Amino acid sequence: MRMLVTGGAGFIGANFVHQTVRERPDVELTVLDALTYAGNESSLDPVADAVTFVRGDIADTDLVDSLVADTDVVVHFAAESHNDNSLHDPWPFVRTNVIGTYQLLEAVRRHDTRYHHISTDEVYGDLELDDPAKFTPDTPYNPSSPYSSTKASSDLLVRAWVRSFGVQATISNCSNNYGPYQHVEKFIPRQITNVIDGIRPKLYGKGENVRDWIHVEDHNSAVWSIIEKGAIGETYLIGADGETSNKDVVEAILEIMGLDCDAYDHVSDRPGHDMRYAIDATRLRTELGWEPRYRNFREGLAATVAWYQANEAWWRPQKDATEAKYAQLGR
Ligand code: NAD
Ligand code: TDX
């Protein structure tokens, strides 16, 4: 099988490539990645011999067409992915997430290529803390931020291309991922690397917001289940029952790193900050037989702390510029 992975130098895409090289040596992998500030080609160093890397833009019609012509399956991870950035400058989000997805859909339509679309639970908006409900594939779309609205737009393009043009596509909407190779702008790596640098972790607002954490390897094993067994045109929600408040995450990081649990600061809240996400992954579990491997968030978090401690050379070059951006936002 020839597979084109967009965004394979980003966090989830790089982990997907590693896992695929490890577990499916029969797959011929090509990565298409623009290497924006969020992309890091060195994340692919351990598998460089097994992967063809193409630096390029998913919004480049001709490049995308020529790569899709030579592939059997496209797995589309590439995106602008950070909510805080989208509040500051939404345009790259519209360009990459909406127009880039459009270009990929047109290419898979021309070449009749299987396509899997990676998306987020944020398309559903948020839930109240005391609401017993979780997101299901029938939850109405109600995105809050420029980031989540562009991801919702891209999902709707996929659905329309399936129905109108018979494109062979599936969609997955996953909750918050953690694990190795995540950019230091994101919540968990930011706090771990802050602690390493002697900076106190920074919690937005009261820290009551809840995210449904899943290990990146579980996200990617679910993606493989959908590629192999998913029904064309279907949407699968991916989650591993990992609901945890931001405050509890920060306290766990501090404890794992041997500091007092209250050694953090509250900073100004994110505008429009979604309160809670929660995934009902019943369809994935019952119809495709998927189960997560990482069932203990604290153990997965401790392994992630250890990874950042051992891989400073990977994250150090991004740290100062990332914190300088946050300083401008007062966070
Ligand atoms: P990331 O920001 O770490 O990586 C994105 C990658 O896409 C980078 O390597 C970047 O260089 C590349 N890219 C950006 N614009 C591009 C363009 N125009 N052309 C080609 N490449 C481009 O993101 P991530 O956290 O790995 O997220 C990957 C996907 O998973 C995204 O679609 C995101 O919406 C989705 N997702 C993420 C999470 C999460 O918790 N991180 C949860 C659910 C869904
Ligand atoms: O320093 C911080 N302090 C803090 O309290 C940062 C960076 C974040 N937060 C809070 C905001 C969120 O409630 O932590 C939570 C997680 O923040 P992010 O890592 O920015 O993730 P989130 O906004 O929840 O979105 C993530 O999950 C869904 C990914 O970035 C998206 O790409 C994915 O779609």
Image (cartoon, helix red, strand yellow):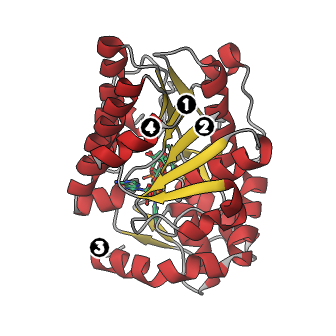
- Of 37 and 327, nearer the camera is 37
- Image-quadrant location for residue 199: bottom right
Dot 1 or dot 2: first in sequence order is 2
Is the residue marked by circle 4 packed among few (<14), some (14-19), or many (20+) residues within 10 Å?
Answer: many
Dot 4 or dot 3: first in sequence order is 4
Is the residue marked by circle 2 packed among few (<14), some (14-19), or many (20+) residues within 10 Å?
Answer: some
Secondary structure state at the residue bearing disc 3:
helix
Q: Is residue 214 above or below residue 258?
A: above
Q: Please give the name of the residue rendered at 40% of the width and 21% of the height, measured from the top-left corner.
A: 139
Q: Amino acid at mark 1?
A: Asp
Q: Are marks 1 and 2 in contact (CB under 8 Å)?
A: yes
Q: Amino acid at mark 2?
A: Arg
Q: Is residue 187 above or below residue 126?
A: below
Image location (x, y in percent) of residue 207: 48, 58
Q: Amino acid at mark 3?
A: Leu
Secondary structure state at the residue bearing disc 4:
helix
Say whether mark 4 is within 8 Å of ligand 1: no
Q: Which mark is residue 223?
A: none
Dot 2 or dot 3: first in sequence order is 2
Residue 283 horizontal side relative to residue 102, left or right: right
Between the C-alphas of marks 4 and 1, the distance is 8 Å
Q: Are marks 4 and 2 in contact (CB under 8 Å)?
A: no
Residue linked to disc 4:
68
Dot 4 or dot 2: first in sequence order is 2
Q: Which mark is residue 72?
A: 1
Residue linked to disc 2:
2
Residue linked to disc 3:
329
Image location (x, y in percent) of residue 228: 66, 24
Q: Amino acid at mark 4?
A: Val
Between the C-alphas of marks 1 and 3, the distance is 43 Å
